[in-house]
Amino acid sequence: MLNQPVGRPVDLLLIEDDPDDVWETQQTLNEAKFTNNLHVAIDGEEAMAFLRREGRYSEAPRPDLILLDLNLPKRDGREILADIQADAALSSIPVVVLTTSRAEEDILCARDLNCHSYISKPVRIDHLLMLIRSLDDFWITITRHAADAPG
């Protein structure tokens, strides 16, 4: 299904401050032939402005999926998760924590804040590619079809 887009492209919001990680994610999405509109916020304040459609983001789309790093400047990922869950307009957006942290307290905190998945960043590009493909298969293809089903 990756090579045949279903409906409109997927709007992904990547909240990541490391330019190398942003570039790697972009390249992986391109390699996976994942039809998407990738939006990037480089810190917590920019991410919340995008999600709330404030200022220069007044026309921003509602993301289908958020990929969130925990360690960000200005407002960290834990604060962003808490804000998303506290906002009825945002709380239904799936959030995948994609971070280098393997600390148990971070995993428990993210779970308590209702993140949908917690994934430690893979080191190798082929692992990131497998991750992106599995995100497409589950969060986008399956979830979108379930949401679009009558009933």
Image (cartoon, rainbow, N blue to C red):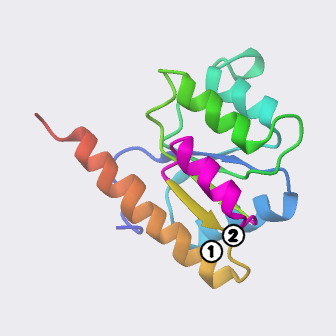
Q: Is residue 23 left or right of residue 84?
A: right
Residue 14 rendering spot, x and y as whole percentages: 67, 48
Label 2 to label 1: alpha-carbon separation: 8 Å
Which residue is label 2 attached to? 121
Frontmost residue, 9 versus 81: 81
Q: Is 123 placed above or below 37 here? A: below
Q: Is residue 125 left or right of residue 66?
A: right
Residue 117 rendering spot, x and y as whole percentages: 51, 57
Which residue is label 1 attached to? 128
Q: Is residue 12 left or right of residue 116?
A: right
Where, by quadrant of the figure, is residue 61 drawn? top right
Span highlighted in magenta in the image: 100-116
The answer to whether one can see residue 4 in this image is yes
Residue at the left extreme, as displayed: 151
Q: Residue at x 60, y 65 (%)?
A: 119
Q: Amino acid at mark 1?
A: Leu
What SS does tag 1 mark?
Answer: helix
Query: Magenta includes 102?
Result: yes
The answer to whether one can see residue 60 in this image is no
Q: Are marks 2 and 1 in contact (CB under 8 Å)?
A: yes
Where, by quadrant of the figure, is residue 82 drawn? top right
Q: Residue at x 82, y 43 (%)?
A: 42
Residue 65 rendering spot, x and y as whole percentages: 51, 46
- The mark nearer the N terminus, 2 or 1, is 2
Frontmost residue, 38 versus 79: 79
What SS does tag 2 mark?
Answer: loop
